[in-house]
Image (cartoon, grey):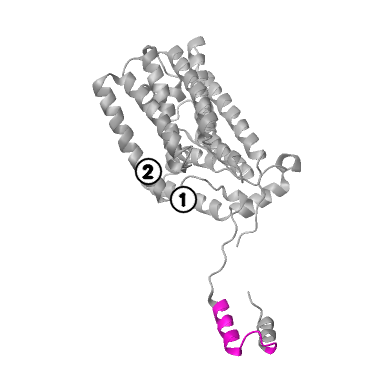
Amino acid sequence: MIASEVLTKGVEQGIITAEQAERLGALDSVREPLELPASPDDEQLRFISGFSDIFVTIGLAMFLGAIAYFANRSINVAWMWASVAVTAWLLAEFFTRRRRMALPSIVLLILFAMAVFTGAGIFLGAGTGLYVGTVTFLNVFGINTNQPTILAAAALLTVLLTAVHYWRFRVPITVAAGCGALTIAVIGLASGFAPQLTPAGDSLVILICGLAIFTLAMRFDMADPERLTRRTDIAFWLHLLAAPLIVHSLIRGLVANTSKLDPTAAVAIMAVFLALSFIAVLIDRRAMLVSGLSYAGYAFATLIREAGFSDMTTPATVLALGAFVLLLSAGWHPLRTAILGVTPSALTRNLPKTSPQT
């Protein structure tokens, strides 16, 4: 802002004319406000750098889809996945290593990891079909697979190749993809060595994996509290992976039958959700909240029905969850400030600091 005294002195000293001073004052009064600098606790995500990312991603989807179709038609489904993996790697040499395009790099890494895992499973004898995408992966949380050894072997090979991929291309999501594959390997080994494991034991295995990934994510977060380097992007994807593993396993461990809740179980789920919300605000990561919203909504709907308002269960649940998300978003910064103020400094020393918001 140009002070009026400065303009007056400029006119008196002959630097500018009175008309120019008036025009400068008018221009200064109508200018657009400066943007506030990005706060480290706004959880910035380097996901897309421009519309060219979307344009290239559309092209990648069409090209790789056609490659998969012709490979499956000419040879078989196993070689189809091998072709997709090889092609995704070659395309990454240009769009990731040379162009450094964010969204295409993420898509190519996901396709590469899925193709390696699926193709390896089929090559090892899991049969044809979308090995991970349609059956096994949907059953991971329930530890329900008929071929755990093949599942573990395919996952370990995926871990190895994603590690090589990260060494070559340094895409932040690669670390989470490798951890996801390693989690599947652990689940497969647990199913193979302890097929009689109870549902509570299954949930414990998943919870341990989720907590391990969460710990790794926090190591990356605490190494970059200002969230300026690649570490914060790696931490984001790790949190996104850890959150559903932790939330799902906790709920399954507390509630035997999530398809039919009683009021006591619903209250327990709400308590877990609130505790996870506190942790999410403390560490300034929203993935935990997103993962728990569906369970919180189901529990809240149960409580509404038990209160005798069954005719408005769905709209009341959506209204309550929407209001919670909006209020939490609006009050995120002051709430974090309050929580950080009462939390021992030894725990918050390397966490992102809140910034004044206007």
Q: CA distance from mark 1 to mark 2?
A: 34 Å
Which range is magenta? 12-29
**Local crowd size for mark 1, using a 10 Å CA cut-off: few (<14), some (14–19), many (≥20):** few
Instruction: Report the residue marked by disc 2.
Output: 56
Where residue 154 sits, quadrant-wise, is top left
Q: Secondary structure at mark 2?
A: helix
**Residue 134 is at least partly visible in this image:** no
198 lies left or right of 55: right
Q: Nearer the viewer, residue 12 or 219?
A: 12
295, above or below 180, in the image: below
Q: Where is mark 1, residue-wise?
A: 322
- Mark before the other along the chain sequence, 1 or 2: 2
Relative height, residue 33 to residue 226 (above, below): below
Mark 2, residues whose alpha carbon is within 10 Å: few (<14), some, or many (≥20)?
some
The image quadrant that residue 218 belongs to is top right
* Disc 1 versus disc 2: nearer the observer: 2
Amino acid at the residue labelled 2: Val
Quarter of the figure with the C terminus: bottom right
Predominant SS along the magenta part:
helix
Q: Residue at x 44, y 34 (%)?
A: 92
- Residue in the foreground of this view, choosing between 232 and 88: 88
Could you tell me how many numbered marks the image carries? 2
* Nearer the observer, 283 or 248: 283
Q: Position of residue 167 (x, y in %)?
A: 55, 29
Residue at x 42%, y 40% (from the top left corner): 104
